[in-house]
Image (spheres, coloured by chain):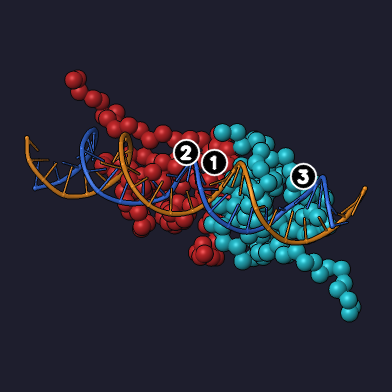
Chain colours: A cyan, B red, C blue, D orange
DNA sequence: CTTAGTGTTCGATGAGCATCGTACATTGCG
DNA sequence: CGCAATGTACGATGCTCATCGAACACTAAG
């Protein structure tokens, strides 16, 4: 492919962290936040690569939202891909569950809406 | 003042929270702290009611230590009982695991010493 | 090219919390 | 009783982090 084939974006690719290299403390800290819990749950209820960052119903602005996704990436919880102007997401279920068995289930299979 | 019957301590009994009434966010926040993780691990390696609060090898003062145990109690992770001048502890393994399956295992069955 | 949509980065702000030092309470011992 | 040991309560301090506003970058469409 001589010419700049599709896939070579000019945009800075999101930095991903492999769940296997994430410490327990990092994972727990990432998950101990109401906004991020909501993001994870909402993301889990959608098919992979179907949700852009701005499509989540969270009570924060763009800047904070971007920050939260950065934290989730750093914890190996979310994978992102640029698709045109938007950045679509995918929950790394199997990979994260292999590193921290049961943790993701705790967040998703939860009856209480973390009231408190 | 009239005399006190045996078994009626003058000391304020520690306030305990049942694990069943703890929200996911509270539990995760309690556990997302390096000092508290160390306390839980050290406590898990000892028999019930054998460790007083001051017997843990953590790099904080008495006041902070007392605070951490308060948080652990509030998350339903630790039960305390007054035994003479000291306050001895017990990890609520079964009860906490019933409420948050796998979470305690994640902290204990850990290979990495939360290095980061 | 211009415009609109999407997301990141930067600096600043504010709240929460981990920590400390000190004072205080309780217990057990000499 | 007086004293040491243990743990809590309180006020203060400092730091981390969640948030915002604004500026910037990239993409797609008109």
**Residue displayed at 37% across by 56% down:** B58
Badge 3 and badge 1 both on one subunit: no
In the figure, is residue A59 to the left or right of B4?
right
**In which chain is the residue bearing label 2?**
B
Residue tagged 2: B74
- Asked whether residue B42 is in view, the answer is yes
Q: CA distance from mark 3 to mark 2?
A: 35 Å
Could you say which is closer to the camera, residue A96 or residue A79? Answer: A79
Callout 2 secondary element: helix
Up-down relation of residue D21 to residue B33 (above or below): above
Callout 1 secondary element: helix
Dot 3: within a 10 Å radius of its alpha carbon, few (fewer than 14), some, or many (20 or more) residues?
few
The location of residue B48, given as percent across then percent down, is 41, 48
**In which chain is the residue bearing label 3?**
A
Q: CA distance from mark 3 to mark 1?
A: 27 Å
Dot 2: within a 10 Å radius of its alpha carbon, few (fewer than 14), some, or many (20 or more) residues?
many
The location of residue B77, given as percent across then percent down, is 49, 44
Query: Marks 2 and 1: CB-CB under 8 Å?
Result: yes
Q: CA distance from mark 2 to mark 1?
A: 8 Å
Q: Which mark is residue A55?
A: 3
Residue tagged 1: B26
Dot 1: within a 10 Å radius of its alpha carbon, few (fewer than 14), some, or many (20 or more) residues?
many
Up-down relation of residue A20 to residue B29 (above or below): below
- Asked whether residue B40 is in view, the answer is no
Query: Marks 3 and 1: CB-CB under 8 Å?
Result: no
**Nearer the observer, disc 2 or disc 1?**
1
The location of residue A77, given as percent across then percent down, is 68, 56
Up-down relation of residue A7 to residue A113 (above or below): below
**Residue displayed at 36% across by 57% down:** B59
Q: How many marks?
A: 3
């Amino acid at each position: 492919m001589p010419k700049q084939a599709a896939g070579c974006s000019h945009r800075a690719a999101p930095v991903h962290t492999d769940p296997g290299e994430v410490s327990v403390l990092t994972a727990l800290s990432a998950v101990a936040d109401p906004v991020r819990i909501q993001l994870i749950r909402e993301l889990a209820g959608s098919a992979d690569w179907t949700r852009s960052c701005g499509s989540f119903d969270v009570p924060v602005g763009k800047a904070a939202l971007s920050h939260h996704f950065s934290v989730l990436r750093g914890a190996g919880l979310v994978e992102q891909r640029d698709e045109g102007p938007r950045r679509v997401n995918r929950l790394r279920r199997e990979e994260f569950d292999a590193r921290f068995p049961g943790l993701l289930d705790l967040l998703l299979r939860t009856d209480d809406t973390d009231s408190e």
